[in-house]
Image: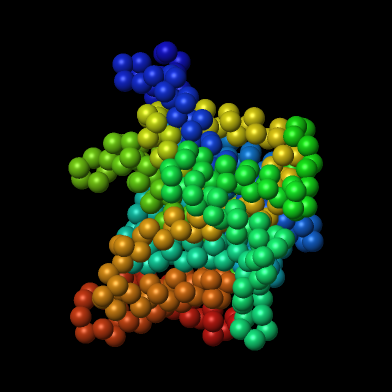
């Protein structure tokens, strides 16, 4: 017990080993879907030389490493894995839209992780977070949710491109689109009925239904984890001083920063660790663990690794120490040997998760004062432009510019912070000179 106390902050008088381990298993079941979703999203980069099988292993390693750092260093029951929304920005914006290589994107994530560490040590993170208005923070989450929901619908063929209307409804009466629609309904029913691990079970149920439909192709169950040799430590330093690298790093930083803060504060509140003044013991250590996990993720070849809100499911089961997150990490380590099973899952089976996660990310809309147009218009620009421009970074930049212009010209309320004005000028310069 003394070892558990030293390693994980475990107190025999307050905590139970069985409870902590069951909580860790619960957290794993609710977030294991990332092992299927991440490779599916990264499969779009297969033609660019990024091995999809390797991204499965990288995803699992990042989850194991990040969660173990949280368990041993911060001693918190929070689990980490490559982030939703951040993976979409990596693949669809940086690589497929902006035309940069996946090595460029990995370099940006490494830089972001290093900056995250510096910002945590110097407390700059708090300054940056404080100058961004809450309405824009909420809007970023909502916009990312709509963006990844759109990606899920497209991957399943439920929404397809149309030369006349840009997008239109696909043929949902057969094939992949039909399976995707069925999967969404199955997953939604499970979520509504609060079935533990609903997203994972939704993926598995949809995958099984895809077998008689000829969409799921069984590849086996067990094997050694695919090698990450071709994607690990693959950085591209030639572009680190470019304008686009700055924009990409800032975007990764913004999304990761707001997502991490919201998640950790939400999970800490659930665990009863928040004090009356809004502070949390060990908060900086939790932030540092998240920052170090991002660096590890970049090194093994995957997108930004961040704290998952699904950690609250384990906390709800009684998890309170690093033993909970350590158990989750061990589950991810074991899952690496089930690569054939996870890689058999078709895009139509992961589309429901992207769609439902999009629903989850709509929650902050209740924090936006929609009747105050000074607040709601910039938020709306941020939300709408992400899926409409197919770019998270464009949504953030245009929303920030709009907020600053309205704030400077409004006759009411305080003026935007000088740092926000500087960021807006840099973003505007990007559109004027770098388009």
Q: Point out residue 283 in the picture as x, y percentages from the top left corner.
A: 36, 41
Residue drawn where x is 43% and y is 19% of the image: 17
Residue drawn where x is 20% and y is 80% of the image: 412
* Left or right: 61 as drawn, with respect to 29: right
Residue drawn where x is 55% and y is 32% of the image: 329
When asked about the image quadrant of residue 408, the answer is bottom left
Question: How many numbered marks does the figure carry?
Answer: 0
Nearer-the-camera pick, 50 or 131: 50
Looking at the picture, the colour scheme in use is rainbow
- In the rendered view, tell whether residue 64 sits above or below residue 44: above
Q: Quadrant of the N terminus?
A: top left
- In the rendered view, tell whether residue 73 sits above or below residue 102: above
Q: Point out residue 40 in the picture as x, y percentages from the top left corner.
A: 68, 53
Give the residue furthest to the top: 1
Q: Is residue 342 visible?
A: yes
Q: Quadrant of the C terminus?
A: bottom right
When asked about the image quadrant of residue 284, the answer is top left
- In the rendered view, tell whether residue 246 sits above or below residue 11: below
Q: Is residue 84 visible?
A: no
Residue drawn where x is 44% and y is 55% of the image: 360
- In the rendered view, tell whether residue 313 sits above or below residue 211: above
Nearer-the-camera pick, 150 or 285: 150
Q: Point out residue 230 in the picture as x, y percentages from the top left corner.
A: 78, 48
* Left or right: 153 as drawn, with respect to 408: right
Q: Point out residue 389 in the picture as x, y percentages from the top left corner.
A: 56, 76
* Left or right: 371 as drawn, with respect to 434: left
């Amino acid at each position: 017990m003394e070892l558990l106390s030293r390693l994980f902050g475990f107190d025999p008088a307050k905590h139970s080993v069985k409870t902590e381990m069951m909580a860790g298993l619960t957290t794993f079941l609710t977030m294991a879907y990332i092992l299927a979703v991440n490779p599916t999203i990264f499969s779009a980069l297969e033609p660019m030389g990024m091995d999809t099988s390797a991204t499965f292993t990288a995803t699992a390693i990042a989850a194991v490493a990040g969660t173990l750092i949280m368990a041993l260093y911060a001693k918190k029951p929070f689990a980490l894995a490559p982030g939703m929304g951040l993976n979409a920005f990596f693949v669809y914006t940086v690589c497929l839209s902006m035309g940069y290589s996946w090595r460029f994107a990995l370099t940006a994530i490494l830089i972001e992780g290093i900056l995250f560490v510096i910002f945590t040590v110097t407390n700059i993170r708090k300054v940056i977070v404080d100058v961004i208005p809450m309405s824009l923070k909420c809007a970023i989450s909502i916009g990312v949710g709509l963006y990844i929901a759109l990606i899920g619908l497209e991957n399943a063929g439920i929404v397809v491109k149309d030369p006349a209307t840009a997008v239109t409804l696909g043929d949902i009466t057969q094939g992949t689109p039909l399976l995707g629609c069925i999967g969404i309904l199955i997953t939604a029913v499970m979520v509504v009925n609060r079935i533990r691990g609903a997203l994972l079970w939704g993926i598995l149920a949809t995958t099984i239904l895809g077998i008689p439909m000829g969409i799921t192709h069984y590849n086996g169950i067990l094997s050694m984890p695919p090698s990450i040799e071709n994607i690990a430590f693959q950085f591209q330093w030639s572009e680190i001083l470019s304008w686009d690298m700055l924009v990409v790093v800032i975007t990764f930083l913004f999304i990761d920063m707001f997502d991490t803060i919201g998640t950790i504060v939400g999970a800490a509140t659930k665990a009863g660790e928040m004090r009356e003044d809004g502070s949390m013991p060990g908060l900086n250590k939790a932030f540092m663990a998240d920052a170090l996990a991002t660096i590890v993720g970049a090194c093994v070849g995957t997108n930004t690794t961040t704290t998952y809100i699904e950690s609250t499911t384990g906390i709800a089961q009684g998890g309170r120490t690093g033993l909970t997150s350590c158990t989750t990490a061990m589950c991810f380590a074991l899952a690496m040997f089930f690569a054939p099973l996870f890689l058999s899952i078709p895009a139509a089976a992961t589309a429901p998760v992207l769609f439902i996660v999009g629903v989850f990310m709509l929650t902050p809309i209740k924090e936006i004062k929609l009747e105050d147009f000074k607040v709601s218009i910039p938020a709306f620009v941020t939300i709408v432009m992400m899926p409409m421009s197919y770019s998270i970074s464009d949504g953030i930049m245009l929303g920030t510019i709009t907020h600053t212009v309205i704030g400077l010209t409004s006759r009411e309320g305080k003026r935007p912070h000088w740092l926000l004005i500087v960021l807006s000028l840099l973003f505007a310069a990007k559109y004027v000179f770098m388009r």
